[in-house]
Amino acid sequence: MKPDLSIVTQRLQERENSLSPHAANSFATRGRERSEVSSPVRTEFQRDRDRIIHCKAFRRLKHKTQVFIAPVGDHFVTRLTHTLEVAQIARTIARALNLNEDLAEAAALAHDIGHPPFGHAGEQALSDVVPEGFRHAEQSLRVVEKLEALNLTWEVRDGIVNSSKVREDIMAEAWGTPATLEGQVVKLSDAIAYINHDIADAIRAGLIADRDLPAEVVQTLGARHSERINTLVCDIVQHCWWASGEGNLPAEQRISMSQPVWAAANCLREFMFQRVYLLEDRQKETEQAKQIVRRLYRHFVDHSDEIQSDFVIESDPAWRRAADYVAGMTDGYALKVAAHLGSTVSMPAGRFSDA
């Protein structure tokens, strides 16, 4: 006799009912754009996570740049390894605060799924030429809603589109605040992950050394990679203990950091902008990457019949199809297509090697 799988659903619901009253419950989701029969062995957020992991756009992240463009070394962070680090940090924080770990994981895994090749250089290049502008968070939402049609829950989609941050402040909300606490956890986890792994990559590339980090950052956050992440994660958990359902609610119910740690994180982020992200020695490489993306976009706007991909919507205007096609490219494929088109722009080979 086969077991009745309804008992699995009952167990899943009981587990979610034991979460913080401030957690997002998958059984109370705002739903999907298209109704579906529920799974007997997974929550709605678990189904979203699995769909993201199995989609094509997620697989392509392994060949997309995080910061250093087309590096030679095997140890540099890619968009995929960054995504996995964000998911790990988000799950840790969500679990500690008794929030919905599945929702945090799903939103984290998809937050960069629409990122174009060559990191933020590629994003800026598309933003310059696409008629409606281009932001990777909005493109990530477009990927899961339109291009791959994953039919995710509202809560996961909200966490994806509101995951971006501005330079001025790690806590700034210029591009929207996630409606769920889990989405807010992902937004901060993204910053925690990239600030720290970008330091490691910059050291590996010879751009900075450990001794260059601001003294106030080292004193507050720690001198080592693991120390800084642990400090940031523990500070968020302690500062937001109310989210676990224990303690008094603050006037502003938002996932955040304590003032000293917040200030140190912003200091570290600004240091990275000055010494790594906007370093003059990297501007030639960045501009070359932008030229390749602009060249590809303009070519496929004018020759949309050459787009051989199921990652576009045929009824869309030429500019939209070109933007989707180029944004979906990996670094290596973008370089290959540019070379095929006779582009005179090329990326410097062997710029970085393993440390």
Image (spheres, rainbow, N blue to C red):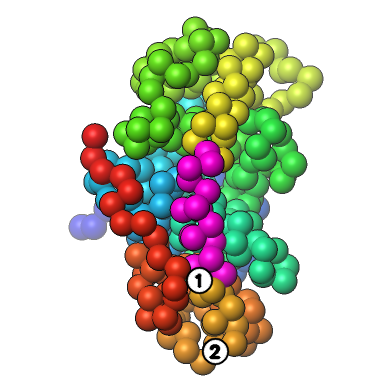
* Residue at the left extreme of this rendering: 1
- Most common SS among magenta residues: helix
The amino acid type found where label 2 is placed reads His
Placement of 49 over or under 300, stated as above or below: above
- Look at 72% across and 38% down and name the residue there: 173
Left or right of residue 35, residue 42 in this image: left
What is the quadrant of the C terminus in the image? top left
Residue labelled with disc 1 = 326
Q: Residue 344 in the image: x percent, y percent? A: 44, 73
What is the quadrant of the N terminus in the image? bottom left
Q: Nearer the viewer, residue 222 or 59?
A: 222
> Which quadrant holds residue 142?
bottom right
Q: Is residue 137 visible?
A: yes
Left or right of residue 67, residue 5 in this image: left
Q: Which residues are magenta?
A: 279-294
- Look at 48% across and 60% down and name the residue there: 289
Left or right of residue 312, residue 348 in this image: left
Q: Residue 286 in the image: x percent, y percent? A: 51, 53
